[in-house]
Amino acid sequence: MRRTLAIAVVIAAGTGPGVVPSTAQTPATAPSATQAATSTSGSIEKGRTTFARTGCAQCHGREAQGSPTTGPRLGPGAIPYAAFSRYVRAPRQQMPPYTDRVLPDTDLADIYAFVQSRPKPTTPRLLQP
Ligand code: HEC
């Protein structure tokens, strides 16, 4: 029991300080009318900021490149937006959920645009078999 608790604490600490404040800092205002009107497809630049601010970057890396220990690469070639959104709202494994209060759909669309715009990874020659 004590052991389980210690592990839980380590995992929670591993998510870093950004995650906790971001859940508390629910955007005070809805996106402005102009923003909402233009965001049929997401904004890459806004997505970059939101990806970092919301804490996604802490597990998935600043460029959504992923890490072997904290979270997989997300893009380019991400899963379709519907599945992406479904996962973020209700993850099935270790990832914490993000409701639309914490992360509105418009922000998630921006994140998706950012993730999809990442360059393809190159395979370092020295590591090829
Ligand atoms: C605490 C670490 C953590 C944070 C923060 C986090 N993720 Fe994840 N994410 C994971 C892990 C680990 C997985 C692999 C599946 C699992 O364990 O839930 C994952 C899986 C995903 C998947 C599914 C990928 C696939 O191909 O199936 C998506 C999409 C995703 N994350 C998006 C996001 C977005 C967007 C954010 C920010 C709003 C975010 N994640 C924040 C750890 C995190």
Image: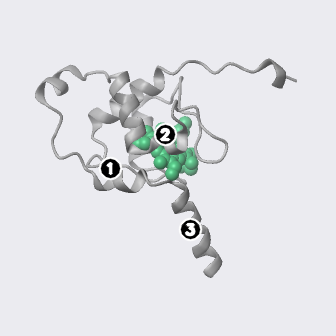
- The residue labelled by disc 2 is 57
Query: Which residue: 42% across, 25% down?
Result: 114
Report whether the residue tagged 3 is closer than 8 Å to ligand 1.
no
Q: Quadrant of the N terminus?
A: bottom right
User: For the view shown, which residue lies furthest in the right direction?
Assistant: 129
Answer with left or right where residue 50 lies relative to residue 64: left
Circle 2 residues within 10 Å: few <14, some 14–19, many ≥20: many
Q: Is residue 38 above or below residue 57?
A: above
Report whether the residue tagged 1 is closer than 8 Å to ligand 1.
no
Question: Tag 1, which secondary structure?
Answer: loop
Q: In the picture, residue 126 is in which quadrant?
A: top right
Q: For the residues marked 3 and 2, what is the alpha-carbon distance in whole angstroms?
A: 21 Å
Q: Amino acid at mark 2?
A: Ala
Query: Which residue: 82% across, 25% down?
Result: 127
Q: Which mark is residue 99?
A: 1
40 vs 21, nearest the viewer: 21
Report whether the residue tagged 2 is closer than 8 Å to ligand 1.
yes
First in sequence, mark 2 or 1: give its number: 2
Answer with left or right where residue 72 lies relative to residue 37: right
Q: Is residue 58 above or below residue 82?
A: below
Q: Position of residue 76 (x, y in %)?
A: 53, 23
